[in-house]
Image (cartoon, rainbow, N blue to C red):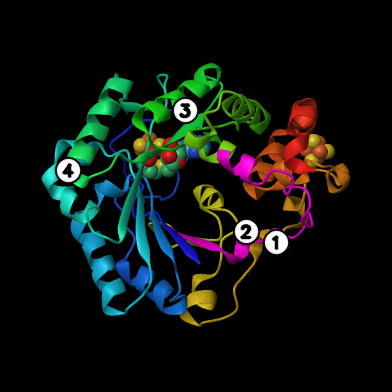
């Protein structure tokens, strides 16, 4: 298992696309550590705890030192992987450097061009500021963090620039299409972002972009597995500030398809499968079952849910069919 922990919804940034703005009734609510320990007792082979939010640096560093102490005391194999805007690290590096240098801790950050990623309503998180954060991280922690770029209609035209930046920094970026949660009221069609992955591969930049690299690595194998053998439910869990519990971080943002924590964790019951149980999330439409693009179009159940809710299955399908000649080498 992997565990996503969103310890708080609070964040020091004001990104206009943020998916994680409706996690709690009271923004001061924080996740009790005992909930994480109970999860680790139930799933002691947990490989990674992904720390997310909100911004995880809105919690005191002691919160994470306690998790590390628990992991080491119990002899668990678990590592911690932060996803943070790192602005609080930049402002107070002495507070965070010892934690980030711990051998069980890794850090990823987020950046993209355009004006949707914002330090405040008045101030954009620019490339210049991103370099300053990355430089300080390199100096104090010893490496530059990889980064996630969220692609929306506002920044789509220049999306490949983020990958060129990753090459200059010699890190990996991950271009993710925006999902519809929180402030982002509409999803961004993944076909537009697959167009960018193909451009990234054509420009020889796949080494610096996670999804393009995956496409290349899976060349010829994507379409050969049984299209209905996906198992989102059995690999990952997500704990949110109020202690609510999901089998997908994105559904957690919507507080939908929860897993019963008491039954699965506290009483040690069987692993639950709320996403598999929802037949509406199995595929976009019956034609997908015989389509070579099944795995790409139906790989993410949150995306299936968004496209159906938005009534855009046909729009999405048309876009993907248009890419089929170029995607064919990867799917058959
Ligand atoms: C919710 S944030 C929490 C961590 C931290 N505050 C950050 O931004 O890196 C986790 C990741 O989700 C991304 N994200 C935010 N809103 C999104 C959306 N609507 N669709 C897809 N990804 C989104 C962020 O850019 C970030 O990379
Ligand atoms: S994307 Fe991350 S940094 Fe931006 S507002 Fe959301 S939680 Fe904060
Ligand atoms: S291209 Fe259309 S039919 Fe094929 S998998 Fe995607 S949505 Fe389904």
Q: CA distance from mark 3 to mark 4?
A: 24 Å
The single residue placed furthest to the left in the displayed view is: 94
Q: CA distance from mark 2 to mark 4?
A: 37 Å
Q: CA distance from mark 4 to mark 1?
A: 44 Å
Query: Marks 3 and 2: which is nearer the front?
Result: 3
Q: CA distance from mark 3 to mark 2?
A: 28 Å
Name which of mark 3 and mark 1 comes first in the sequence.
Answer: 3
> To which residue does mark 4 refer?
140
Residue 310 x %, y % = 69, 34
Name which of mark 4 and mark 1 comes first in the sequence.
Answer: 4
Q: Label 2 neighbourhood size at 10 Å, few (<14), some (14-19), many (20+)?
A: some
Query: Marks 4 and 1: which is nearer the front?
Result: 4
Circle 1 — which element? helix
Residue 315 seen in the current view: no
User: Ligand 3: which quarter?
Assistant: top right
Residue at position x 63%, y 40% from top? 216
Q: Is residue 284 left or right of residue 242?
A: right
* Image quadrant assignment for residue 86: top left
Residue at position x 27%, y 21% from top? 128
Residue 209 seen in the current view: yes
Q: Is residue 290 above or below residue 4?
A: above
* Marks 1 & 2, CB-CB < 8 Å contact: yes
> To which residue does mark 2 refer?
232
* Image quadrant assignment for residue 72: bottom left
Residue 227 x %, y % = 78, 54
> To which residue does mark 3 refer?
163
Circle 2 — which element? helix
Q: Which quarter shows the C terminus?
A: top right
- Please state the extent of the stretch shown in magenta in the rendering: 213-239
């Amino acid at each position: 298992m992997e565990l996503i922990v969103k310890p708080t919804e609070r964040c020091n940034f004001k990104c206009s696309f943020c998916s994680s703005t409706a996690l709690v009734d009271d923004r001061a609510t924080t996740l009790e550590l005992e909930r994480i320990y109970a999860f680790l007792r139930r799933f002691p082979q947990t490989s990674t705890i992904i720390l997310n939010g909100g911004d995880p640096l809105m919690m005191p560093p002691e919160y994470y030192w306690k998790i590390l102490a628990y992991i080491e005391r119990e002899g668990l194999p678990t590592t911690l992987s932060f996803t943070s805007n790192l602005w609080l690290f930049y402002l107070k590096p002495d507070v965070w450097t010892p934690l980030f240098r711990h051998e069980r801790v890794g850090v990823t950050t987020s950046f993209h061009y355009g004006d949707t990623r914002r330090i405040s309503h008045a101030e954009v998180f620019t490339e210049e500021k991103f370099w300053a954060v990355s430089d300080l991280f390199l100096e104090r922690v010893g490496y530059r963090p990889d980064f996630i770029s969220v692609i929306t209609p506002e920044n789509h035209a220049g999306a490949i620039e983020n990958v060129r930046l990753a090459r200059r920094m010699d890190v990996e970026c991950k271009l993710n299409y925006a999902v519809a949660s929180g402030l982002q009221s509409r999803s961004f069609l993944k076909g537009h972002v697959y167009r960018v992955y193909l451009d990234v591969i054509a420009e020889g930049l796949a080494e610096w972009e996670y999804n393009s690299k995956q496409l290349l690595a899976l060349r010829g194998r994507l379409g050969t597995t049984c299209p209905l053998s996906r198992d989102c439910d059995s690999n990952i869990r997500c704990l949110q500030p109020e202690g609510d519990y999901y089998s997908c971080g994105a559904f957690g943002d919507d507080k939908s398809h929860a897993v019963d924590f008491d039954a699965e964790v506290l009483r040690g019951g069987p692993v639950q499968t709320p996403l598999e149980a929802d037949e509406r999330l199995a595929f976009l439409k019956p034609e997908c079952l015989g389509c070579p693009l099944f795995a790409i179009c139906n790989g993410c159940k949150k995306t299936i849910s968004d496209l159906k809710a938005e009534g855009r299955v046909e729009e999405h399908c048309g876009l993907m069919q248009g890419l089929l000649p170029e995607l064919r080498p990867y799917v058959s």
